[in-house]
Amino acid sequence: MSDELRWDPTVGSAEIGVASKNGVITLSGQLDSYAKKYAATRAAERVAGVRAIAEELKVVLPRSYKRTDTDVAHSVPRYSSGTCRCRRTR
């Protein structure tokens, strides 16, 4: 399993702990993106003989990606005005 994680360029194998017993793989650790979490799970699914995956990965986004509700509320009008092209339905 560790070889599969090292092979996948999306996932840093040093960030993920791997344990295996009777075909059950446990992935644990802290990642900085949901893409890495998804890639790690997909890598585990590619390993021959894996019967189940216990995914205990936690995603902690960098501070720069966190937005308050107020930030989101202020950005909605900017992104939604004039950008929606919806067909009229009867």
Image (cartoon, rainbow, N blue to C red):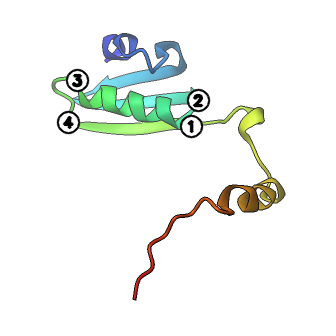
| Rendering coords of residue 66 (x, y %) | 74, 42
Q: Earlier in the sequence, mark 2 or mark 4?
A: 2
Residue that mark 4 sits on: 51
Q: In the rendered image, which residue does mark 2 sit on?
A: 30
Instruction: Name the residue tied to disc 3.
Output: 47
Kindly identify the residue that appears in the image at 54 percent across and 28 percent down.
Answer: 29
Q: Residue at x 49, y 70 (%)?
A: 86
Residue 58 lies left or right of residue 2; in this view the side is right
Which SS class for mark 2? strand
Image quadrant occupied by the C terminus: bottom left
The amino acid marked with disc number 1 is: Lys
Confirm or deny contact between disc 2 and disc 1 (CB under 8 A): yes
Label 3's element? loop
Q: Amino acid at mark 4?
A: Arg
Looking at the rendering, which quadrant does residue 18 occupy? top left
* Quarter of the figure that contains the N terminus: top left
Q: Earlier in the sequence, mark 3 or mark 2?
A: 2
Work out how far the residue at label 2 is from the one at label 1, CA to CA, in angstroms.
5 Å
* Relative horizontal placement of residue 12, taking residue 77 as reference (left or right): left
Q: Looking at numbered disc 2 in the image, what kind of residue is underneath it?
A: Gln
